[in-house]
Image (tube, rainbow, N blue to C red):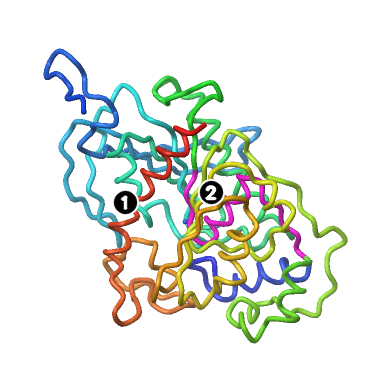
Amino acid sequence: MKFSLVPATRLRLLCSCLWSCLGLLALPVLVAPAAADAAEAGWRQITIPVSATNPAAIPVALYYPTQTLARAIPMGPSTLRVAIGAPPDPKVKGLIIVSHGTGGSELGHTSLAEALARHGYLVAALRHPGDNWEDHSIWQQPPGTFFTERPRQASRVIDALLADPEWKDKIATDVQGPRIGAVGHSAGGYTVIALAGGQVELSRIGAHCKTDSKDDPSFCSMGGDSKSPPPATTLLPLATDPRVRAVVAMAPAGVFFTAASLAAIKIPTAVYAAERDRWLVPRFHAEWVAQNVPHAEFHMIPNAWHFAFMDRPGTPIQTLDGDAAADPPGFDREVLLTQLRKDLPAFFDKAFAQE
């Protein structure tokens, strides 16, 4: 199963559980610039601490609109263009959660987060505890833990920011409450669809790989065709967060969602697929989600591999699907990301405006 960056041994541990069981000008000086007019992205890192409801600390990268000049800052394999620690604008247009793929990090989609921040949004990109580049402990947990914990972790970040004295009054609200959206890639795509109301039925995985393993070989080769007996309960509890009012799922893992739960999703949803995705073959995953969510926007990206939605890392990162920095001949990742930097802010603007 390809969610993103994770060693094969740990993927098999997960899969053994799964299958066996991403025109007004502000007046200078006299009037503060509106968030939508912000020219730059500010950046801070916070940590959601351990508590009675939060069993693991959650590192979060915050991107937000600011009037402070940004600069290019290398961080590991990523390069951010942000103003670190800059003062935020007085108001933001909404809160957008960003969920990375398995084995990834909070910096994997920094250019999209920066674009949303420059457009006036507060963006919270979390590092999923137990499922990131340096911590794979979720794979040793009981069956279903991956599916339940990921959306819960995203909801805990929302809880924290809505209670934070610095941020809670900056987030735009309307009659429905705070304006909150979510973006996710791969396993993060699963996460945001779960927040929207998608429900996991683990038995769907085994059934899929029994009939379609030849057409979805990478997904099914890592445990999907296991002969182990399934768990007693395979329909997992819903992880819906009703505060999330619009989602974007990029190359999502989706075969395990029930059609009925997807059909019940009513919030604005956009689904992106990579045409040549070899780990989450679109017709079983992204297309399954898009076909069943009413009125979902669907975008097939021609000639793209799975990692096309991530910023290109500055150094090679080897994964089960090859180098995460590589693309097929003739594919220009920066062209896609440039378009997404326009499309995502426009999608959320429209979603919140029509409610």
Residue at the far left: name it: 28
Instruction: Tell me which residue sits at (66%, 70%) in the image.
Output: 13
Instruction: Using the image, tell me which numbered label, if any, was put on residue 269.
Output: 2
Marks 2 and 1 close (CB-CB < 8 Å): no
- The x, y position of residue 214, in whole percent, is 64, 86
Residue holding disc 1: 341
Residue in front for this viewpoint, 45 or 150: 150
Helix, strand or loop at disc 2?
A: strand
Instruction: Using the image, tell me which numbered label, if any, was put on residue 219.
Output: none
The amino acid type found where label 2 is placed reads: Thr
Instruction: Tell me which residue sits at (36%, 50%) in the image.
Output: 343
Q: Is residue 339 magenta?
A: no
- The x, y position of residue 276, in whole percent, is 46, 77
Instruction: Tell me which residue sits at (61%, 59%) in the image.
Output: 289
Helix, strand or loop at disc 1?
A: helix
Q: Which residues are magenta?
A: 182-202
- The x, y position of residue 251, in whole percent, is 50, 64
Q: How much space separates mark 2 and mark 1, taking CA atoms?
A: 17 Å
Residue at the far bottom: name it: 214
Q: Is residue 185 magenta?
A: yes
Residue at the far top: name it: 30
Neighbor class of circle 2 (other Cα within 10 Å; few <14, some 14-19, many 20+) is many
**Quadrant of the rendering where the N terminus is positioned:** bottom right
- The x, y position of residue 306, in whole percent, is 45, 70
Residue 225 image-quadrant placement: bottom right
166 versus 130 height, above or below: above
Neighbor class of circle 1 (other Cα within 10 Å; few <14, some 14-19, many 20+) is some
Can I make out residue 163 in this image?
Answer: yes
